[in-house]
Image (cartoon, rainbow, N blue to C red):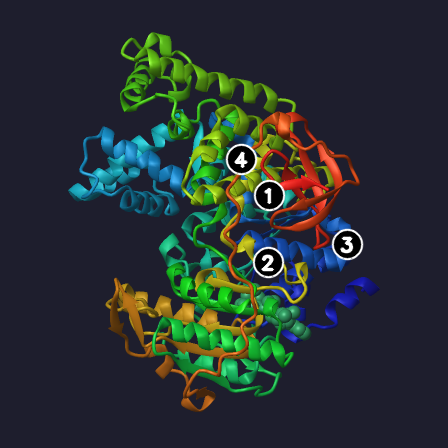
Amino acid sequence: MNDAAQALLTGLNEPQRQAVEHAGSPLLIVAGAGSGKTRVLTHRIAYLLAERGAHPGEILAITFTNKAAAEMRERVEGLIGPRSRAMWVLTFHSACLRILRREAHRLGWKPSFTIYDTDDARRLLTQIVKDLGLDSKKHSPRWLAAEISRLKNELIGPDRAAAAADDARAALVADVYAQYDERLRLAQAVDFDDIIGATVKLFREFPEVARSYRLRFRHVMVDEYQDTNHAQYTLVRELVGTGDDKSELCVVGDADQSIYAFRGATIRNIIEFERDFPDAKTILLEQNYRSTQTILDAANGVIRNNTERGREKRLWSDEGTGSAILGHTGDNEHDEAAWVAGRIDELVDDKETSFGDTAIFYRTNAQSRAFEEVFVRRGIPYKVVGGVRFYERKEVRDMLAYLKLTANPDDTVSAMRVVNVPKRGVGDRAVAEVEALAARLRISFPAALHRVDEAPGVSGRARTGIKRFCEIVDEATALAGTAPPEEVLDKLIADTGYLEGLEQSTDPRDEGRVENLQELVAVAHEFTEQVVRGTVEDDEAELNADVPSFLEHVALVSDADSIPDPEAEEGGVVTLMTLHTAKGLEFDTVFLTGLDDGLFPHERSMNKPGDLEEERRLAYVGLTRARKHLHLTRAGTRNIFGQPEYYAASRFLAEIPGDLVKWSESAPPPRVVKSKSPSFGQPIVVRNAADVPALDVGDRVSHDKWGLGRVVELKGAGPRAQARIDFGDGEPKWVILRLAPISKL
Ligand SMILES: Nc1ncnc2c1ncn2[C@@H]1O[C@H](COP(=O)(O)OP(=O)(O)OP(=O)(O)O)[C@@H](O)[C@H]1O
Ligand SMILES: [Mg+2]
C-alpha cells in the first residue's frame, strides 16, 4: 500500500478501516449518531483515488442538504487537494439537475427548463383548482400539493394514479395531478419532485443513457441513506445497475435518525438493503467520537423506547462522562429564552464555548421569536436558519420571476406573478382574456401575452401595460444573452420601476425591501465572481456566469445553507434552527428547547404510534448533535392567541435517566446588558441617476449603517453603478450606488 493510502487509514478504527478498504459488493454502513459515518465516506473517497486508481470523475457522492455537500467537498479537498473538484459531491437534486440539463432533449424538454419551487407549484395548483371550479376550502392547494408530491415520491404518474383511484378523493387528486403535469409541461417547467422522477424516467426509457452514467460513475456513495424515499432509492438502483457493468455502491445511514417520513422517506430502504442488493456487506460502527457518555446515555434512553428500529446498536464513547446535562423549566417562553441567553453568556465568558459553536433547536419555526427578542436585547449575535427566508420574500421572488422569464419565455407561473407587478393596469379580466387566447392557440401564457393584439377583449389600458411588460422582458432577455446575471437584474429593477414604487411607499417595511433587492444583486454578483474564479463547485465548467446558471444556483439553495461559517466572524454567531435542519451537524453546546408535551412531541403526532416514533427520532437527532454541553429547556406555560396555556413536560424528558440531568431552580441572574439595539434606519432614498455620487477607487466614503469605508472596485454606470467598499470588517461589500445611503468624504 502506498503512503498516502496508509495515512488515510490511520485515524480510523477497525470497522471504519474495513469500510474504507472494502471493494466490490454493495456496502452498507449502519451506525448511530457521531460514529464517523460521514468520515468514512470522505476517507473512502480519498482512498479510492490514492490506492485503487480511481479517477475523481468516477466518483459520485450524494447527500441531502447543500450545506452537507459543501462540507463533504471541503473535507475531501482537505484530504486530496484540488483534484476533488472534478468529483460530483452533490445533493440528490443538484446531481439529477446536472444530468437533466444535459439530457433534457431526450425527454422533449428545452435545456432551459425552469424549476418551480414549493410556492410556484402551489400557485399553479391554485390556478387549476379555480379553473376546475373546485372549492378551494375543501380541496386546498396545500393539500393537493402534498398528495401529488406523495405520488411523485412513489413514482406514480397521473395515469396510474387515476387507474388506482378507488374513491372520489383519489380520483380528484388524479385529475388535478394530470392537469398539473400538463401545465408544467406547457410552461417548460419541473417541480422539485420531478427532478428526481424525471431522471429515473430518463434512465428507464433510455437504458443506453443510464449505462453511460453507470460507466462514468464507477463509485456511488450516499450519506443519510435512511432519509431516501422510493424515487431516490430507485434512482440509486438504476444508476448503479445490477448487471456485469454495475458500479460500486456504498451507503451509510442510521434508522434511528430517519426524520423525513413526510417527504416519503422510508427506513425500509436501510432495513432491506441486504435484500435489495443480495451480495451486500454490512458494517456496524459502535464507537461515538462526538459526544460525552452522559449525552449518549440520554440519547440512548430516549431512542430505546422506539419499537421500529432496524438493527440493534450499542453506542459508546471514549470522551468520558463530561459535564451534567442542565435542565430548566421557565415560567413562560420568555423566561425560557432568558435562561438560555444567560447560560450562553456564562459559557462564553468562561471560555467553555463560543457563539459559533452554540446551537438552539426547536420543533417549529415560530419558536425562534422569543429567543430572537432576548438575544437582540442582550447583544448575543445569532442567525436563524429557516423562517421567512431571503428567497421567499416577495420582492426577491418578484425579481426572480422576471429573471426566470428571460431564461424561459414560456414560464407561465412567473409571467402570471409579475405581469402586473408593479401595477401597470393589467387586471384579472385582461389576464383571463390572455389565458383564453393561450388555450385557443395552445401556447403558453407568456407567449400569448406577446400576441395580445389577437385577444379582442383586452382593454386599451391593459393592452398598453402588457406591451410594456413584454418590452421589459424582451430587452432583458436580449441583455441576458451577453451579460452576467447581476446586470440583467439591475436592468430589470430599473426598467420595471420597482424601486420607484418602494420609494414612494410610506410603509416602513419597504426599506427592508429595497435592501433585499440590493442584496439580491449582490448575491448575483458574488455568484458571477465565484464562477469566474472557479470557486463554485464546477464540473467541466458547466456553470456559467449567466442567468440560467444563477437561477439554478438560487433554486438549490436550501435552508441549511444559511448556517454561518463559524470562521467567518470571530467567535461566530449562535445558530437557531429547527430539529429537521440540524441533522448531520455537530456543536459543542446545544440547547434543545420547547420540551413541552404537545409542542414536542407535536400534538399532531400523539395519536399515531408511527408518528410518535418519528418525533422520538427527531429528539434523538437533537440530543446527539451536542459534543460537550447539552441543555434541555421548556416553558411550562405559553401564550397561545394571547391566552396562557399550561403544558406538561415532554414525555421524552421522562425517558432520560433522571441522574443525568441537573434541573435549575431559577434563571441565572441577568448579566449586564450589552447595547446593541435593532436599528430602525433612515428612510430610504433612491437617487436619480444624475445624483449618484461620482467615485473613484481609493475614495473614502461614509455609509449610514456600516460607517467609514474605502472604495476598492467600481463597475456599471449611471443607475447601475456599483461600488465595492471595504468597511474594514471582513469581505468588502458591493453596494448599488443609487440605493446605498452613502456619501463621499
Ligand atoms: N476514528 C476517529 N477518530 C477521531 N475522530 C473521529 C473518528 N471517527 C469520527 N470522528 C469524529 O467524530 C465526529 C462525528 O463523525 P461523523 O460526523 O462522521 O459522524 P456521523 O456518523 O456521520 O454522525 P451523524 O449520524 O450525526 O451524521 C466528527 O467530528 C469526526 O471527525
Ligand atoms: Mg453524518
**Circle 3 crowding by C-alpha within 10 Å: few under 14, some 14–19, many from 20:** few
Question: Which circle's residue, 4 or 3, is located before the other in the chain?
Answer: 3
Residue lying at the far left of the rendered structure? 168
Question: Which circle's residue, 2 or 4, is located before the other in the chain?
Answer: 4
Q: Residue, x 48% and y 34% (percent of image)? A: 503
**Observer-nearest residue: 411 or 462?**
462
**Observer-nearest residue: 156 or 189?**
189
Which residue does the numbered mark 1 point to in the structure image? 214
The image quadrant where one finds the N terminus is bottom right
Label annotation for residue 81: 3
The answer for how far apart the CA atoms under marks 4 and 3 are is 29 Å
Residue 61 percent across, percent down from the top left: 60, 52
**Observer-nearest residue: 625 or 674?**
674
**Observer-nearest residue: 169 or 272?**
169
The answer for how far apart the CA atoms under marks 4 and 1 are is 15 Å
Residue 286 percent across, percent down from the top left: 56, 77
Ligand 1, by image quadrant, is bottom right
Question: Which circle's residue, 1 or 2, is located before the other in the chain?
Answer: 1
The answer for how far apart the CA atoms under marks 2 and 4 are is 31 Å
Which residue does the numbered mark 2 point to in the structure image? 564
Q: Label 2 CB, ligand 1: below 8 Å? A: no
In the rendered image of this protein, does residue 704 appear above or below residue 677? above
Question: Which circle's residue, 4 or 1, is located before the other in the chain?
Answer: 4
What amino acid is found at the position of numbered circle 2 in the picture?
A: Pro
